Image (spheres, rainbow, N blue to C red):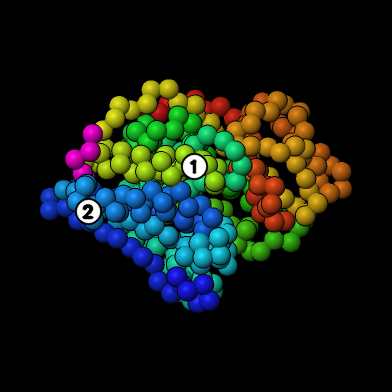
Amino acid sequence: MNQNLPPSSLRIHQFAGLSAGPKLLVLGAVHGNEVCGTQAIERLRAELEAGDIAIERGQLTLVPIVNPLAYQKGQRQGDRNLNRNLGITAQPQDFEDRVANVLCPLLAAHDVLLDLHSFHTAGQPFVMIGPTDNNGGLEPFAHAQQEARLVAHLGPSRVVEGWMSTYERGVQRRRTSGQAYAPALLDARYGVGTSEYMRAHGGYGVTLECGQHQDPKAPETAYRAIRQTLALLQLAPIALEPAGTEFETLQLADVIDREHPQDQFARPWASFDKVHAGDVIGRRHDGREITAPADGHIVFPNPNATPGAEWFYFAQKSARRIG
C-alpha cells in the first residue's frame, strides 16, 4: 500500500459453496490498530486458496481490513470511529462515511457476522452479545437463541451484553450535562456499529474482543473463532468442538465520558478489573471523584480517550444464560 496515497477501495474475498447454506461475513480491522482479526483472516484465506479448507455450502466473505485508512495510519480511526453511527450516507463527509456505504450493503446481504476486535488494556478475551428477543424501539431482535449458540462455540467464557441500552443512557447524560457536544453524540443511534447494523437488517452477529492489541495469543483466538463458526454453520468440513458450559455474563450498566484532558484514572485499570461500591475509579480535572456506584467491573477503560468520548464502562453480573 502506498503510504502517501489515501486508500480508495476495500479488499473483499468471497468463497461460495455449491450447496445452499447461510452467508457468513468475517471482519477485521474495523479499527485500524486492532490487527488480530486481519492476521487470522489472512491465515484462513491462505488455507482456503491452497485447498487445505473448502467451503462446501453457503457463502463466506472475508474483509481483512475494513478501515484501510486507519490501518494505514496504525491507529483506531481515520477521520472518525467507523464503529459508531454506522449507516448509508447520501453525501459522505469523511473517509468512514465512504467505507460505510460499501460495508452496510455487505452486512445486509449476509446472515451471520463475526467481527474481530482487540482492546487497549490487559485482559482476557470476551464476546459482546446482542439483546434478548424483543419488539422494543431501540434494538428489536428475533435471533437471540442463534446468537447465543454462536457465542457458546467461540471459545471465550466471558460475555458482555447491554451495549445499546448503556450507550443510550450515556447520551441522556450528555443531553443534560450542559456541555457542548456534536449533534451526533446526542443521538442514541450513534451507538450503532457493525453487529447492531446486522441485527437491524435481519441477521445476527457478535463482536469478539480477542485480547489486548499486542497480545500474541489474540490472532490465534480470532483464527479459532472463525473456524468454529464455519463448523457451527456447516460451511466447511471442520470438526465442531463442544460448546462451553461455564460462562461469566456481565451487563453493561453505565458509560462515563472523559470531560477534560486532565481527567485521570485513580490507577491503571484493565478491562474487567473488579471494583466495590464507593471505590474511586478516577478524578476529574477539578478534583471531583468518580466512584463505583455498586460492586461491579470496569470495562473498556481508555486512558487516552479524547474529551467527549467514552472513558470507561461499568458492568455488573447478569442473570442471562448462554448455551
Left or right placement of residue 218 versus residue 184 in this view: left
Residue 230, given in percent of the width and then of the height, sits at: 27, 43
Tell me the residue at 23%/56% (across/down).
Answer: 49
Tell me the residue at 45%/67% (across/down).
Answer: 99
Q: Quadrant of the N terminus?
A: bottom left
Left or right placement of residue 47 versus residue 278 in this view: left
> Of all residues shown, which one is farthest toward the left?
18
Q: Nearer the viewer, residue 16 or 97?
A: 16
Q: CA gap, disc 2 to disc 1?
A: 25 Å
Q: Nearer the viewer, residue 85 or 26?
A: 26
Tell me the residue at 63%/37% (across/down).
Answer: 270
Left or right placement of residue 151 versus residue 168 in this view: left
| Residue type beneath disc 1 | Pro
Left or right placement of residue 44 versus residue 94 in this view: left
The residue where tag 1 is placed is 216
Residue 39, given in percent of the width and then of the height, sits at: 41, 51
Residue 257 at least partly seen: no
The residue where tag 2 is placed is 50
Residue 321, given in percent of the width and then of the height, sits at: 42, 26
Q: Dividing the picture into quarters, in which one does residue 77 lie?
A: bottom right
Q: Quadrant of the C terminus?
A: top left
What stretch of residues is rendered in magenta? 235-239
Q: Is residue 76 above or below residue 216?
A: below
Q: Is residue 97 above or below residue 186?
A: below
Q: Any mark on residue 281, and which?
A: none
Residue 121 at least partly seen: yes
**Dot 1: what SS?**
loop
Q: Earlier in the sequence, mark 2 or mark 1?
A: 2
| Residue type beneath disc 2 | Ala
- Dominant secondary structure of the residues highlighted in magenta in the image: loop
Q: Nearer the viewer, residue 70 or 167?
A: 70
- Numbered label tally: 2
